[in-house]
Amino acid sequence: MAGLAHFGLEALQRVVRDIIPNGALVSQRLNDVPEIALYLIDESYPQYALDDDAIQRIMTQPLYWVFCWASGQVLARFLLDHPELVKGKRVVDFGAGSGVVAIAAAMAGAREVIACDLDPIALEACRINAEINEVQLVTHQDFNSVRGDIDIIVVADVLYDRNNMPWVAHFSERASTVLIADSRIKDFSVAPYRVIARADSDTVPDLDESASFRHVTVYQAGP
C-alpha cells in the first residue's frame, strides 16, 4: 500500500472511536450483495447529538468508508451479475471507500483490481475487507499515478461533490470502459455515458436518507 503501513483491524477500530464516540466496526453482510461482508460501523452507532468537538473531528476526517452507500451496493451487485464486464481485466475502483465495488470486481474474476482513494485510512479498510472476503486488491492513493493500461474504471457515490464532475471526462479518456453508479445527480447528460441500469438500494447501516437517494442509476461509457 502506497504511503501507509498495514496497521490492522484494532487500529482501525481506534480511528473510529477517536472520531465517533463509542463507535465500533463490525463485520456485516450486505442486504443486496450478501456474498460480500464488510467491516462497517455498528448500526447502533451514536445517533444522539454529538458535542462540538466530535462534530469537528467528523468534519475534519469524514469516515465515508464506515458505511456502504446505496450506489456501491448497486454497482457491486451489477458486477457480480455481469462478471463478463470485468473477467480477466485490469480494473480501477475510483473513490473506493469501503472497497465494496473493488471486492465485487475481484470476485467476478478481474485479473487485477486497484482500489484508489485519497484517504489512506479508507485504503486500509479496503485491505481488511478484501481479506475477509478472500480476494486480493492493490491499493493506491493517487489515481493519476496508476501506471499502465486500465481496462475498466468503476465509480460509485463520488458525484455528491460537484467538484468531482471533471473526472467524468477524464475517466473515459483513460479507460475503454467506465461504469458510474450514482443517486445524487438526477440529470447526468455527459457524452459518451448512457444509462444501462437502475435499481433501488440503501446505506448499510441505514442512515434513513431521503427516498430519492435510494434510487441509483448506472451509467456506462464504452462498449
Image: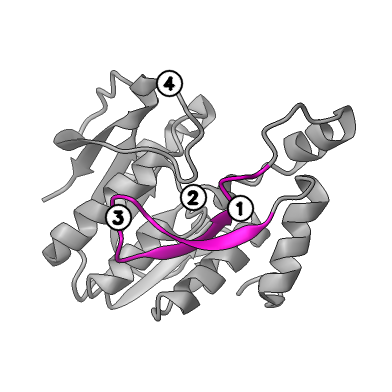
What residue sits 31% from the left and 38% below the top?
A: 201
Residue range of the region highlighted in magenta in the rendering:
24-45
Question: For the N terminus, which image quadrant?
Answer: bottom right
The foreground one among 156 and 176 is: 156
Q: Residue 120: image x %, image y %?
A: 66, 60
Is residue 44 one of those drawn in magenta?
Answer: yes
User: For the residue labelled by badge 4, is the local secondary structure a helix, a strand or a loop?
Assistant: loop
Mark 4 → mark 1, Cα distance in angstroms: 27 Å
Q: Residue 115: image x %, image y %?
A: 46, 63
The amino acid marked with disc number 3 is: Ala
Is residue 151 one of those drawn in magenta?
Answer: no
Q: Which mark is residue 118?
A: 1
The amino acid marked with disc number 2 is: Gly
Indicate left or right for 58 with 70 as reference.
right
The numbered mark, 2 or 4, whose residue comes first in the sequence reads: 2
Residue 35 sits in quarter: bottom left
User: For the residue labelled by badge 3, is the local secondary structure a helix, a strand or a loop?
Assistant: helix
- Quickly name the residue at label 3: 76
Q: Please identify, in this view, whether the residue under mark 2 or under mark 4 is nearer the observer.
A: 4
- Quickly name the residue at label 2: 95
- Quickly name the residue at label 4: 210
Indicate left or right for 96 with 86 as reference.
right
The numbered mark, 2 or 1, whose residue comes first in the sequence reads: 2
Mark 2 → mark 1, Cα distance in angstroms: 7 Å
Dot 4 crowding, Cα within 10 Å, few <14, some 14–19, many 20+: few
Mark 2 → mark 3, Cα distance in angstroms: 14 Å
